């Protein structure tokens, strides 16, 4: 009796097909670590710990000081900085150890995230688990992660010579790069999850409505970083007015452009009211995601942006109290995830 072997439309071997579900799960795990990193970065900023380590040692800096002599050496280096001389003169060793811990933990977590991305990437690559077409994108994410470490040191270095704090421009670059990587991880994980359901699915496209919403959100994040870098949240504890005025008492003498990039009052004003342009843009994105058939993404965007605006108000009226300020930063990262999710849903529908 003759029999025919009917071959499946796609190869059955894991190596040939890749493992999009497993790779997507790994990317979500790395994304969760970055959210944790954003939280630790917020703690580092709010406790003014970022300048406590005055050198960048990618390998030997993994270990903290292990003896009293080592601690004295590190403390002496910090005592030579403008921040210590002008802000923290007379700080005790116990206080120094507290701020040192948060900066050390922030850097350690960055190293762990790098390993959590690089080592599985190598394993997936050589085991043939990465679906075709995704290798360049994952390499780009790896390169951006490496660049983030360099940008972090570039930021810290700006506060070690003449300033008592880091440059708010470099702080913004550091935060925005981290959130860009986070968005890239979410987008790629969503592409791979789509590939699990449909082996013929291509990557989602970035549609104009999504691009506009993400650009508006990026501006808001940038001014949020400026606000943190210049302690602009402390210029007023009133809402919606600023010290009894709608327009703040900023220094406009050098032009509007200079003021909104450098004056704490003007930066606070822009960050406060640009939030509502961001709200409008994200509502449009959420509706587009819902029309594309992804109601959960729309709910996530609406929830995250609403909570974030409320947290911003609470942070201001509380005088930048620690817990609302930290939660505000963490929810900002979750808002980026929600926006990337919604943008991907719109792009996937178009694709």
Image (spheres, grey):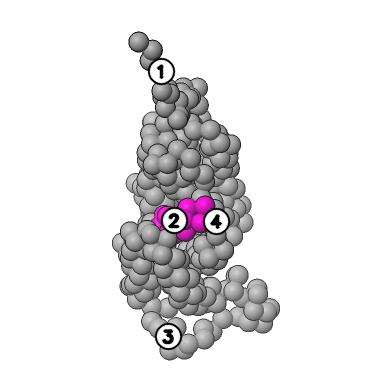
Q: What element carries label 1?
A: loop
Q: From the viewer's perspective, tell me whether residue 318 is left or right of residue 80.
A: left
x and y, in percent, of residue 143 in the image? 58, 39
Relative height, residue 72 to residue 225 (above, below): above
Numbered circle sitting on residue 345? 2
User: Distance between the Cα atoms at labels 1 and 2?
Assistant: 42 Å
Relative height, residue 80 to residue 4 (above, below): below
Which is more foreground, mark 1 or mark 3? 1
Please tell me in which quadrant of the rendered image residue 166 appears.
Answer: bottom right
Tell me if I can see residue 56 in this picture. Answer: no
Q: What stretch is highlighted in magenta?
A: 335-351
Q: Name the residue under label 4.
A: 206
Looking at the image, tell me whether mark 2 or mark 4 is earlier in sequence order: 4
Numbered circle sitting on residue 247? none
User: Distance between the Cα atoms at labels 2 and 3?
Assistant: 38 Å
User: Distance between the Cα atoms at labels 4 and 1?
Assistant: 45 Å
Q: From the viewer's perspective, tell me whether residue 85 is left or right of residue 162.
A: left
Task: Characterize the local packing of mark 2: few (<14), some (14-19) or many (20 or more) Cα atoms within 10 angstroms.
Answer: many
Residue 341 magenta-highlighted: yes
Single out the residue that lies furthest toward the left.
Answer: 323
Q: Name the residue under label 3.
A: 241
Looking at the image, tell me whether mark 1 or mark 2 is earlier in sequence order: 1
User: Distance between the Cα atoms at labels 1 and 3?
Assistant: 79 Å
Please tell me in which quadrant of the rendered image residue 301 appears.
Answer: bottom left
Q: Are marks 4 and 1 in contact (CB under 8 Å)?
A: no
Task: Characterize the local packing of mark 3: few (<14), some (14-19) or many (20 or more) Cα atoms within 10 angstroms.
Answer: few
Q: Which of 294 and 124 is in front in this view?
A: 294
């Amino acid at each position: 009796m003759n029999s025919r072997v009917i071959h499946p439309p796609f190869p059955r071997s894991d190596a040939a097909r890749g493992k999009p579900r497993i790779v997507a799960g790994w990317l979500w795990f790395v994304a969760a670590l970055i959210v944790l990193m954003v939280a630790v970065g917020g703690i580092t900023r709010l406790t003014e710990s970022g300048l406590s380590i005055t050198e960048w040692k990618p390998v030997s800096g993994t270990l903290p000081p292990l003896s009293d002599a080592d601690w004295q050496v590190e403390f002496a280096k910090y005592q030579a900085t403008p921040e210590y001389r002008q802000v923290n003169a007379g700080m005790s060793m116990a206080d120094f150890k507290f701020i040192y811990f948060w900066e050390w933990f922030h850097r350690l977590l960055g190293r762990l995230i790098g390993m959590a991305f690089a080592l599985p990437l190598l394993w997936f690559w050589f085991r043939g688990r990465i679906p075709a077409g995704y290798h360049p994108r994952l390499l780009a994410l790896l390169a951006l992660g490496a660049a983030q470490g360099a940008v972090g040191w570039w930021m810290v270095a700006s506060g070690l010579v003449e300033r008592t704090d880091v440059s708010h421009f470099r702080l913004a670059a550091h935060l925005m790069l981290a959130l860009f990587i986070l968005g890239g991880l979410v987008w790629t994980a969503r592409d791979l999850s789509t590939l699990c359901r449909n082996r013929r699915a291509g990557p989602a496209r970035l549609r104009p409505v999504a691009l506009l919403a993400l650009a508006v959100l990026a501006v808001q994040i940038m001014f949020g970083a400026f606000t943190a870098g210049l302690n602009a949240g402390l210029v007023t504890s009133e809402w919606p007015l600023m010290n009894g005025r709608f327009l703040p008492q900023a220094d406009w003498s050098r032009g509007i452009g200079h003021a909104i990039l450098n004056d704490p009052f003007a930066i606070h004003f822009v960050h406060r009211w640009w939030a509502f342009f961001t709200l409008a843009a994200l509502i449009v994105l959420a509706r587009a995601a819902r029309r594309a058939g992804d109601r959960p993404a729309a709910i996530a965007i609406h929830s995250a942006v609403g909570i974030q605006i409320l947290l911003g108000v609470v942070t201001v009226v509380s005088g930048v109290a620690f817990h609302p300020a930290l939660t505000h930063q963490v929810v900002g990262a979750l808002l980026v995830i929600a926006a990337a999710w919604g943008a991907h849903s719109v792009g996937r529908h178009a694709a």
